[in-house]
Amino acid sequence: MAYTEKRTARDGSTAHVGRFRVDGRLRSTRAFRSRRDALAEARRAEEAGKRGEWVDPRSGTATVGDWFVAWQAGRVDRAPRTLEAERERFASLVAPTFGDTPLRQVAHDDVARWAATMTAPRTGQVASPARRRDAVRLLVALLDGAVDARRLTSNPARTPSGRVPSLPRAPKTKPHRYLSHEQLRRVADAAGTPQARTLVLLAGLTGLRWGEVSALRGGDVDLLRRRVTVERAYTRLDDGTVLLGDTKTHARREVPLPGVLAGDVEALLAGGPDLLFTGRSGAPLRRESFDRHAFRPAVRAAGGAVSTLQELLGVPVSGLFDAGTLVAVREVQRRAGLRVDGVVGAATWQALVEADRAARDHLDRAQRISRTRALAAVARVTLAPGAEDFATLTLHDLRHTAASLAIAGGATVKAVQRLLGHESPVLTLRTYAGLFEDDLDRLGEAMSAQFAAHDATTDAHHVLTEATANPAGVSPLRAVAAL
């Protein structure tokens, strides 16, 4: 029960301090001249403690910067890359405004003003909406943690209803890039080495994240069951350090190993039970290295293969393997004594490259070497009538490609969720909602066909019933009257 104590200062003046218990500990209020005021404050604090709403006034004196360090120390279950991104975001966007501010002095208006005007440290200009949104979310989470730790009674970044009106509008996301089966095969073929080709196809057909596919071991592949176990991933920090840990969702999953890749993966498994894909000296394969030396050159060659073909043929460059291009290809094949099928394979490319090599007198040595390398990558690609060039894409777009191909193949939302390792089907639908719209068209056509088939069956049944029930031509009414 709350009570008061009388205390005498050095100057002889007296004051009253309220005493109360919260969480089993005896605590004190500030000093009051009136015993009544001290007792009332102690009773209010004690009741707030019973409701779990009491906050020690001294805890709010910690600065936002000090609380961020303590708050992050308790987030050991977060991925290292997440913690690193939070530290960068806090140091560059949050700390300049609130780093030295005591928690209890953060005001709602200050947060709203900062969210609208925060500047990027390098340019001094207003930060992008995406950066501002991430920074506001970080501050809101930081202050929510202060409320949970009983350092604040409420979050000043939120309204009484819990909303965050100062949160910048979500920026428009970059549209996803999807490859068709034929385009994916082109990129894989242009990648050159067996390891690079297998990695591109595995990522494009299973949707594995880079950290997951680069962390695969020989023991993660079951060739008999045609399954790949995904239970760990590499994370690269900004300082270049590569850490091995759990997957993004901290969950283990299995993805199907496409039969077309079984032989290629089996060849890689001959290297031993260690990493399936490796860099030099058996070290983990780094994303930036693979992207620079294998993936981007392959995308450049495969994505512009039709235009390159048309340049070599001397026909109008449209990026589409059209009828005019087909006629020119067949003429080259006829002159070279090749099979005239219109498909541009290794032999056809060789004939075109040899003709191009004979016409390079106007190029210097460096230009000749560059053109030889470019044509060597393109020559690994097979083109058929109808092929079309495509824009550049990133490694992560292979994950989107896997989702697109799975949905086009009739996969359900749940199956795509399991394939990609999403935490919930809601995330899958939100990410690929546009791809599932085609399902509605197919569903409507299927239901219409089923209804029409049932309607036709019903009509036939009626005709058959009338014919067999009245063979003598007696009307149904007369038959009933006779009964």
Image (cartoon, rainbow, N blue to C red):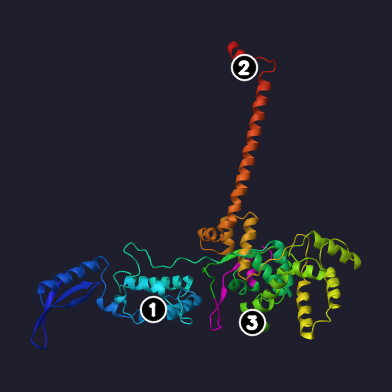
* Residues packed near mark 3 inside 10 Å, few (<14), some (14 to 19) or many (20 plus): few
Callout 3 secondary element? loop
Callout 2 secondary element? helix
Residue 476: which disc? 2
Residue extent of the magenta highlight = 219-244
Q: In which quadrant is the N terminus drawn?
A: bottom left
User: How many discs mark residues in the rendered view?
Assistant: 3
**Residue 175 horizontal side relative to residue 124, left or right:** right
* Label 3 sits on residue: 283
Tell me which numbered mark, 1 or 2, is placed earlier along the sequence. 1
Tell me the amino acid under the disc marked 1.
Phe
Residue 300 lies in the magenta-colored region? no
Name which residue lies at 76% across and 69% down.
381
Query: Label 2 near label 1: C-beta < 8 Å?
Result: no
Query: Label 2 near label 3: C-beta < 8 Å?
Result: no
Percent x, y of residue 275? 64, 76
